[in-house]
Image (cartoon, rainbow, N blue to C red):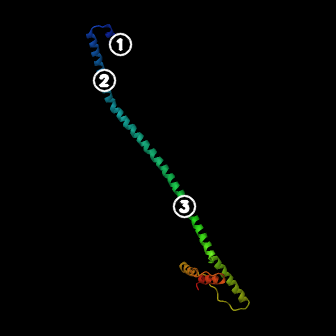
Amino acid sequence: MVKKLKAMADSKADNNQLSAAIKDSAQQIWLAGLGAFSKAQEEGSKVFEALVKEGSTIQMRSKAFTEEKFGEVTGKVTKVAGDVAKQATQSWDKLETVFEERVARALSRLGVPTSKDVAELIARIEALNESVQSLGGKPAAAVRAPRATRTPRAVKAKVEAVVAKPVRTGRKAAKRVAKAVAGE
């Protein structure tokens, strides 16, 4: 079409013929535009529906992917929280052990006998009592072992009372603790 118009302009032919060709060309361009608009209008609704359908599919896939990743992250966070709780428990146990050891050492430095020491003393006293009886002496007053029926609160009160008094060493301290534990 363009070649045709150039050829007409170069030959300097009739101006009417040129203007008619331009009119005809403009008319064809106009009709082509209207046809394209009509085609776009018809196909536009189909394309729009196809795009909506594709968008819906993509949204569903994205939602499923997000839920899957969220589940993985939740599992990892739960595992990390469990590990942290386990470490905290282990640290607490270690701290408790260290505290108990230090308290035991401090009580030992102060001369406060342990329950094991008291039990050994009671056993020794009973053995000595048996030895004295076997030699024909008078039986000494029996040393009472701590009663199982005594409440921990009562034993604790007795031990605290003994510990609160000035620290003595040797036999006197052992006798005081033995008496306190025995309930005398």
Where residue 45 appears, as percent x and y from the top left, is: 33, 33
Q: Which label belongs to residue 115?
A: none
> Could you tell me the amino acid type at mark 3?
Ala
Disc 2 marks which residue? Answer: 33
Measured Cα–Cα span from mark 1 to mark 3:
89 Å
Q: Residues within 10 Å of mark 1 (few under 14, many from 20)?
A: few
> Could you tell me the amino acid type at mark 2?
Gly
* Mark 2 / mark 1, whichever is N-terminal: 1
Q: Nearer the viewer, mark 2 or mark 1?
A: 1
| Quadrant in the picture for the C terminus | bottom right
Disc 2, SS: helix
Q: Quadrant of residue 3?
A: top left
> Could you tell me the amino acid type at mark 1?
Lys
- Give the camera-side residue of 7 and 168: 168
Where residue 55 appears, as percent x and y from the top left, is: 39, 38
Disc 1 marks which residue? Answer: 3
* Mark 3 / mark 2, whichever is N-terminal: 2
- 41 left or right, relative to 106: left
Q: Residues within 10 Å of mark 2 (few under 14, many from 20)?
A: few
Q: Is residue 110 above or below residue 57?
A: below
Measured Cα–Cα span from mark 2 to mark 1:
21 Å
Disc 3 marks which residue? Answer: 88
* Mark 1 / mark 3, whichever is N-terminal: 1
* Identity of the residue drawn at 32% across and 13% down: 5
